[in-house]
């Protein structure tokens, strides 16, 4: 039996997702990076968001006894780790100020956390 999430947690989850995602995107929009660099970081953000939602769903499905193949479960985790590694390598090699690198890293992680929490709340709300 799943308890429905509180409106405060639902709101905080959406704020975390929005702040991380839009902060990251606004930072990209206003940056002096080349268009291909902006595209790389945008793609890594979208890939990361999709992969963490996939991890959350597959972990939750397994806990509830819903069949999830080992391949899908493994690919979900691999994709999440790969997205984080790609962002880390990209920022490590970027010609950005350390404060800019930190901004992108923390906006990315906040967006990933927000996506997981929003997915959890959506699922809890449907099953309650």
Image: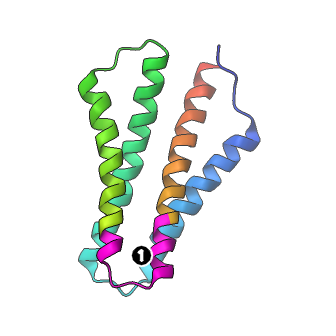
Q: Which residue is mark 1?
A: 28
Where is residue 127? Give x, y as percent. 59, 19
Q: Main secondary structure of the magenta part?
A: helix
Q: Magenta residues?
A: 90-105
Q: Quadrant of the C terminus?
A: top right
Which of the 4 image quarters holds residue 41? bottom left
Residue at point 71% right, 42% down?
9
Residue at point 65% right, 19% down?
2
Which colour style is shown?
A: rainbow
Where is residue 33? Give x, y as percent. 33, 83
Which of the 4 image quarters holds residue 72? top left
Q: How many marks?
A: 1
Where is residue 91? Give x, y as percent. 35, 72
Residue at point 38% right, 51% down?
48
Using the image, determine if residue 127 lies above or below residue 42: above
Instruction: Determine whether, in the image, residue 87 is placed left or right of residue 105.
Output: left
Q: Is residue 96 magenta?
A: yes
Q: Is residue 75 magenta?
A: no
Using the image, determine if residue 92 lies above or below residue 87: below
Residue at point 51% right, 73% down?
103
Where is residue 109? Give x, y as percent. 49, 57
Instruction: Determine whether, in the image, residue 54 is placed left or right of residue 116.
Output: left
* Label 1 secondary element: helix
Q: Residues within 10 Å of mark 1 (few under 14, many from 20)?
A: some
Q: Quadrant of the N terminus?
A: top right
């Amino acid at each position: 039996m799943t308890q429905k999430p509180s409106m405060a947690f639902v709101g905080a989850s959406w704020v975390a997702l929005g702040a991380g995602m839009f902060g990251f995107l606004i930072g990209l929009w206003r940056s002096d990076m080349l268009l291909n660099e902006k595209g790389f970081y945008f793609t890594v953000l979208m890939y990361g968001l999709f992969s963490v939602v996939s991890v959350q769903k597959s972990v939750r499905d397994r806990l509830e006894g819903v069949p999830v193949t080992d391949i899908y479960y493994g690919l979900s985790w691999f994709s999440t780790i790969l997205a984080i590694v790609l962002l880390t390598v990209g920022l490590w090699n970027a010609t950005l100020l350390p404060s800019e690198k930190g901004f992108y890293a923390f906006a990315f992680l906040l967006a990933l956390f927000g996506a997981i929490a929003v997915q959890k709340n959506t699922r809890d709300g449907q099953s309650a």
